[in-house]
Image (spheres, rainbow, N blue to C red):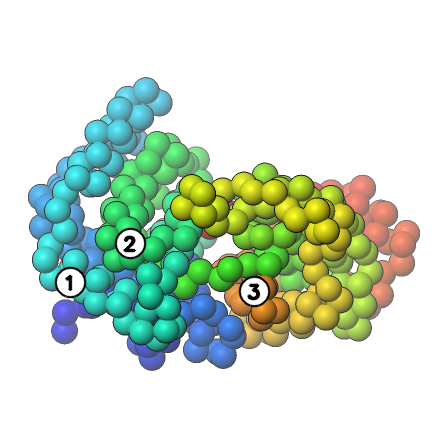
Amino acid sequence: MTSPHVLWIDDPAAPGSRLLGGKFGSLAEMTEAGFAVPPGFGITTTAYRHFLEAAGLADRARQVREQAATADLATVSALSAGFTAEIEAAPLPADLEEAVRGAYAELERRTGIEALPVAVRSSGESEDLAGASFAGQYDTYLWVRGADEVLTYLRKCWAGMFGTAVLTYRPDGGASVVTADHGICVGVQQMVDARSAGVMFTLDPVTGDRSKVVIEGCWGLGEGVVKGDITPTRYVVDKVTFEVVTRALSRQEVQYRFDPSTKAVGMVPVHPDRCDAPCLEDEHIDQLAQLAKRIERHRGAPQDIEWAISEAGDVHVLQVRPETVWSQRRPEAPILEKKSAVDHVLMRFSGGKLATKAGS
């Protein structure tokens, strides 16, 4: 049976499918489990390989990866620039273009919104490899509208597989992961016009304490938190009682939002009434902490979760990935055990370190 060019994340065949790559495969799993994931579809790894073959670029792609494995930075940059330009200029096979246009039109129909704003996200097969964080190397484009723009940014995501950062990434100290012929899915998903957004961990990323949920948020889209451009407001919540243990509020004067004047997502001012106000109400802190605990229970291990809350107050799951620093260590104490302040201080000075977050 021929693999599809498009696979919806609510399709029964989607959970666990390598056709969706790491990121969108995870969202398909979350959708099947009943979590509030915005609707969308993946332009599959099969579609990516079909494009390379039809454009006569498959052999060239292998050559670029192999040459980059032993080349210096200047040479890799030149290889990257040349090949990404070829990808962005190459025509799409007619059957693939038709499939993408049809899927976007169906997403408009399902949501009831014409020219629906979507996020176009890279979702690579290599994102779920042990010891690698390719998710942080790939591209995401926000507030894309119309089938023509989706097709443009589809090519840009494919080209991102051969960006300088990806070609020089050595997660295992060698080139074996980079030279491997990994495919990429490109996910197309309804945008959440976020009132506030951010990330949360089902353990404390500073101490590794698994009895806590840590929520970091900001006004507007969560790009500010993920990219580190905005100092987030931080909440530490007890995973058993859901009591807010710590609130570290941060003044916020700018936010990522769609800017009608530029017709793109960018930094815009926060309304003066919100600059010193917390980006989350207690009700939403509680909802997020309980959501994090349910996702962790469903997946059976600590998780790193991206979330957004719409202006209407609805909570959405945007991305879920395993937490990869502390979760591989033995817990210091069971979840139900309360640590004293002294215990926390000793832990902090005995090797605890801040976990890093992968990008979108």
| Residue kind at label 2, given as amino acid type | Val
Q: Where 164 falls versus 73 (above or below)?
A: below
Sequence-wise first label, 2 or 1: 1
- Whether residue 31 sits left or right of residue 198 in the image: it is left
Residue bearing the label numbered 1: 98
Question: CA gap, disc 3 to disc 2?
Answer: 23 Å
Instruction: List x then y, in percent, for residue 238.
Output: 77, 66
Label 3 crowding class (10 Å Cα cut-off): few <14, some 14-19, many 20+? some
Question: CA gap, disc 2 to disc 1?
Answer: 12 Å
The answer, for residue 132, to whether it is visible in the render is no
Element assignment for label 3 = strand
Q: Where 253 falls versus 118 (above or below)?
A: above
Sequence-wise first label, 3 or 2: 2
The answer, for residue 124, to whether it is visible in the render is yes
| Residue kind at label 3, given as amino acid type | Ser
Whether the residues at callouts 3 and 2 have beta carbons within 8 Å, the answer is no
Q: Quadrant of residue 167?
A: top left
State how many labels appear.
Answer: 3
Query: Which numbered dot is residue 150?
Result: 2
Q: Quadrant of residue 85?
A: top left
Q: Nearer the viewer, mark 3 or mark 1?
A: 3
Q: Where 252 falls versus 10 (above or below)?
A: above
Query: Which numbered dot is residue 283?
Result: none
Residue bearing the label numbered 3: 310
Please name the residue shown 76% across and 48% down the image.
Answer: 276
Q: Quick one: quadrant of the N terminus? A: bottom left
- Whether residue 104 sits left or right of residue 319 in the image: it is left
Please name the residue shown 63% across and 52% down the image.
Answer: 219
Tell which of 180 and 60 is nearer to you: 60
Instruction: List x then y, in percent, for residue 161.
Output: 31, 43
